[in-house]
Amino acid sequence: MTEKSTTKKDSKGTVLIILIIALVALLGVSAFLLWTNQQQKTEIKEIVEMMEFEKEQLEDEYEEFAIQFDGYQTPEIHNDSLVELLSQEKQRVQDLLEELRITKATNARRIAELKKELATVREVMVSYVHQIDSLDRANKQLVQENQEVRQQYQVVVREAKQLAKERTQLAEVVSRASMLEITDFQMIPLNKRDRKTTIYNQILKLQFDYTVGRNITNKPGMKMLYLRITRPDGEVMQKSINNVFKFENKNIAYSLAKEFEYAGEEISGSLYWHVDEILQIGFYNADFFVDGELVGSFPFEIEK
């Protein structure tokens, strides 16, 4: 073998080795690039999964927040503007939740903004709720105080009514105690000689004797005594249709009247009815009135 052939053979071997080395290097680089790409895909997948997880968490927060305030019952308070603001914020949460649902998980910037907005809305709504609850507590306290005042007022009214009733009863007792009373009543039929008679045809005058009882609680002074004589047919015997006096807020007829002075002690007297008509046979009634009160009522009979 010549030297030229040997050199040529060595040159080919070197080239082959270089090619092999280059191939191995290329394969190594390819394998490295493939591995690197796979790693990047894995990392990107993990990042996307994490972003999707964060989005889901944020959606859960929005939904929980929306449910929490949807179920919040607005107390009955007289602050419509505050209640309206709370309603607007509730609607805003719903709108943001809808936007979050359609926003891609890879839109990190918008997800972050929505998360920040959720925190802001939460603070605002919590503030409104605290204000409303505070007003509600104040309103309930006011209602309770008003109720207590009404109850106290009702107690005072009841006590006042009871006191008035007691005063009325006491006044009635005093009035009854101070009321005069006619005693020792007697009707005597008289003839033309003013003598007692039992003969019907001779009766020309009726004498009514009476006694005003002792009563130191009655106001002393001049008083008017009215006698009302009622016939058997129920008609009042009168000399004039103008003979009336006031009793229980109305004018009623009387038969005879007499003024007398009363000083608290027993006093007796007589009244006379002059007969100028045919007397009815039967039972009559003599009613005495003083100070607007009925102070005595006595039946008597005219016989034939």
Image (cartoon, helix red, strand yellow):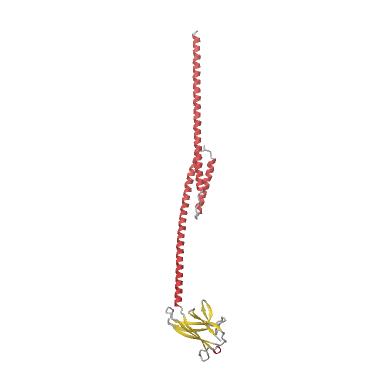
Where does the C terminus fall, quadrant-wise?
Answer: bottom right
Q: Nearer the viewer, residue 111 or 144?
A: 144
Tell me which residue sits at (47%, 52%) in the image: 133
- 146 w.r.t. 254: above or below: above
Q: Is residue 95 above or below residue 36?
A: below
Residue 163: x and y, percent?
A: 44, 69
Tell me how many marks there are: 0
Residue at the image position 45 percent from the left and 74 percent from the top: 173
Where, by quadrant of the figure, is residue 174 drawn?
Answer: bottom left
| Percent position of residue 33, x then y | 50, 26
Front residue of this view, candidates 61 and 296: 296
Question: Which residue does the image show at 53% across and 79% down from the upper left?
Answer: 252
**Up-down: is 259 above or below 12?**
below
Q: Nearer the viewer, residue 56 or 34?
A: 56
Instruction: Residue at the far top: name it.
Output: 1
The location of residue 80, given as percent across then percent down, is: 51, 54
Q: In which quarter of the view is residue 101 placed?
A: top right
In the image, residue 104 sits, relative to residue 189, either above or below, namely above
Which residue is more in the foreground, 16 or 37?
37
User: How far across and down, in percent of the image, does residue 145 sit?
Assistant: 45, 59
Residue at 44% of width from left, 84% of height from top?
267
